[in-house]
Image (cartoon, grey):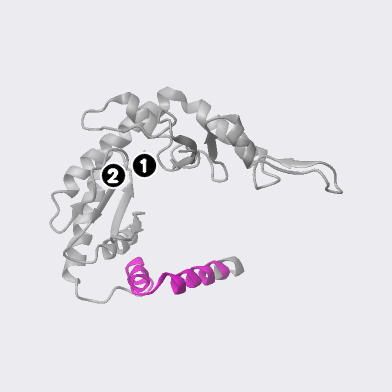
């Protein structure tokens, strides 16, 4: 129809292609990339499952004609002819070199191995989470993300309690839920057992305190407040928060 389609593959860009090749039983990765004729661009973060440092990321285009629209050129600058392929001007070459080194060191074999370990870890954890009273799995997980919610208590309280035990979980909204990004650090019998043990304890604690107000400063309190406000004031609060961080 003449309208471009961008695929945000920042999180799964270095997992999904290898997952498709692995053909793990129970895992069905649908087509999502340039194999679909309507896809015109994709974004992939090398600093996530590409195991590179932050400050590197990749945008891909179906052809060079589309890529050209990303360039910025200013031929009348008094400092000379100025052209840059991105909005950013100067960028550190060291980050790019380190990113290349990470990708080249792992290679396809390394990414295949890690992808299989990560997805199998997610599958094992999913089976255990499904057994925990009060929690339910959102969607039908196929890759490395395990997302769960609750109809019995504020599930974001579980995330706050888990953070006190050293786990880094992401709080989500619409609906309130929590997700775990399985990585190489979450793979392994001991780590997986510790996660489930801590999760069970936190769920029990959250269920017992279901009618209590969330702790001040936690994600449950913040998201609870935001859900009761129009998006305009919430956006202003987010700007104020960013201003405060930049002044700190």
* Label 2: how many Cα within 10 Å (few below 14, some 14–19, many 20+): few
Q: Is residue 188 above or below residue 210?
A: above
**Residue 153: quarter of image:** bottom left
The residue tagged 2 is: 191
**Residue 189: quarter of image:** top left
* Residue at x-position 58% and y-position 35%: 66
The residue tagged 1 is: 185
Disc 1 to disc 2: CB gap under 8 Å: yes
* Residue at x-position 46% and y-position 72%: 232
Disc 1 secondary structure class: loop
* Residue at x-position 62% and y-position 41%: 70
Q: CA distance from mark 1 to mark 2?
A: 8 Å
Q: Which residue lies most toward the right here?
A: 78
State which region is magenta.
Answer: 217-243
How many tags in the picture?
2
Instruction: Report the side of 65 relative to 209 (left or right).
Output: right
* Residue at x-position 64% and y-position 36%: 68
Location of the N terminus by quadrant is top left
Closer-to-camera residue (157/78): 78
**Residue 214: quarter of image:** bottom left
Instruction: Report the side of 44 relative to 170 (left or right).
Output: right
Residue 133 magenta-highlighted: no
Closer-to-camera residue (6/142): 6
Location of the C terminus by quadrant is bottom right
Residue 218 magenta-highlighted: yes
Residue 42: percent from left, percent from top? 48, 38
């Amino acid at each position: 129809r003449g309208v471009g389609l961008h695929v945000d593959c920042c999180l799964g860009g270095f997992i999904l292609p290898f997952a498709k090749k692995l053909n793990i039983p129970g895992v069905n990765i649908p087509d999502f990339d340039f194999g679909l004729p309507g896809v015109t661009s994709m974004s992939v973060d090398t600093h996530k499952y590409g195991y590179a440092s932050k400050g590197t990321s990749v945008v891909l285009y179906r052809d060079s004609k589309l890529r050209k629209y990303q360039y910025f050129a200013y031929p009348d600058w008094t400092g000379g002819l100025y052209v840059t392929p991105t909005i950013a001007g100067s960028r550190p070459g060291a980050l790019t070199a380190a990113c290349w080194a990470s990708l080249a060191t792992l290679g396809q074999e390394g990414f295949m191995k890690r992808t299989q370990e990560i997805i199998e870890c997610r599958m094992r954890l999913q089976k255990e989470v499904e057994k925990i009273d009060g929690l339910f799995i959102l969607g039908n997980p196929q890759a490395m993300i395990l997302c769960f919610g609750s109809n019995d208590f504020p599930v974001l309280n579980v995330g706050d309690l888990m953070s006190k035990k050293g786990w880094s979980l992401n709080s989500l909204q619409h609906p309130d839920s929590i997700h775990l990004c399985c990585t190489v650090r979450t793979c392994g019998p001991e780590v997986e057992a510790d996660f489930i043990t801590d999760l069970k304890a936190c769920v029990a604690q959250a269920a017992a305190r279901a009618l209590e107000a969330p702790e001040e400063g936690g994600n449950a309190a913040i998201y609870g407040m935001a859900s009761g406000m129009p998006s305009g004031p919430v956006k202003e609060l987010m700007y104020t928060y960013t201003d405060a961080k930049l002044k700190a």
